[in-house]
Image: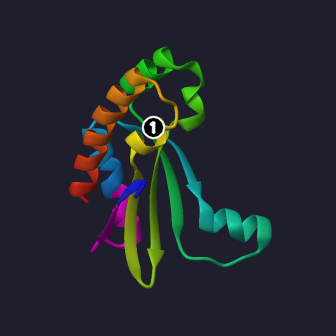
């Protein structure tokens, strides 16, 4: 798997709020929010399930990663998704070790490992 994934008993809106709180506890901010449902409705007039992509960033680790590899910005920020499927709310978070593995840079592997530990704690609290 390329991400952590968890079904939660929280409703969609509460799950988003809870994920943001847990990210903040681990030093992450949310830089972007993409409401996929609203975008699909606006651009294609398609009704879909609730789905949001949160672009989470820990400034300290982002800086370290950029120092190790300037083009790593192509893989930043860390995506977190919250969506509804079959009346259930799902939270999923990218595993940085998987994303960074293709870069083949030892310094990035160490950074990704630490970021992954923190994101693992986030999903465990959701």
Whether residue 121 appears in magenta in the rendering, the answer is: no
Residue 111 appears in the figure: yes
| Position of 40 relative to 23 (above/below) | below
Relative side of 47 to 51, left or right: right
Q: Is residue 8 magenta?
A: yes
Q: Residue furthest right?
A: 44
Q: Could you tell me which secondary element the residue under label 1 belongs to?
A: helix
Instruction: Work out whether residue 59 can be spotted.
Output: no
Q: How many marks?
A: 1
**Which image quarter holds the C terminus?**
bottom left
Residue farthest toward the top in the current orientation of the protein: 67
**x, y (%) of residue 76?**
52, 35
Q: Position of residue 60 (x, y in %)?
A: 37, 22
In the depicted view, which residue is nearer to us: 69 or 22? 69
Question: Residue 28 appears at what percent x and percent y?
Answer: 36, 37
Position of 114 relative to 90 (above/below): above
Question: In this rendering, would 42 be left or right of 33?
Answer: right
Task: Specify the segment rendered in magenta.
Answer: 5-17
Up the image or down, 50 lies above or below 31; here it is below
Report whether 34 appears left or right of 63.
right
Q: Quadrant of residue 73?
A: top right
Q: Position of residue 16 (x, y in %)?
A: 39, 59
Q: What color scheme is it?
A: rainbow
Residue at the spot x=26%, y=48% of the render?
Answer: 120
Residue carrying label 1: 101
Q: Quadrant of the N terminus?
A: bottom left
In the figure, residue 56 lies in which quadrant?
top left
Q: Residue at x 36, y 33 (%)?
A: 112
Residue placed at 48% from the left, 29% from the top? 104
């Amino acid at each position: 798997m390329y991400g952590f994934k968890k079904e939660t008993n929280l409703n969609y809106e509460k799950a988003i709020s809870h994920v943001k709180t847990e990210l903040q506890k681990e030093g992450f901010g949310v830089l972007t929010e993409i409401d996929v449902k609203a975008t699909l409705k606006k651009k294609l007039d398609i009704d879909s399930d609730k789905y949001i992509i949160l672009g989470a960033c820990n400034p300290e680790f982002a800086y370290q990663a950029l120092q190790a590899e300037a083009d790593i910005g192509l893989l930043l920020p860390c995506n977190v998704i919250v969506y509804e499927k079959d009346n259930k709310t799902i939270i999923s978070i990218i595993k940085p070790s998987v994303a960074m593995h293709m870069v083949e840079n030892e310094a990035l592997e160490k950074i990704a490992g630490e970021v992954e530990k923190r994101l693992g704690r986030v999903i465990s609290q959701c």
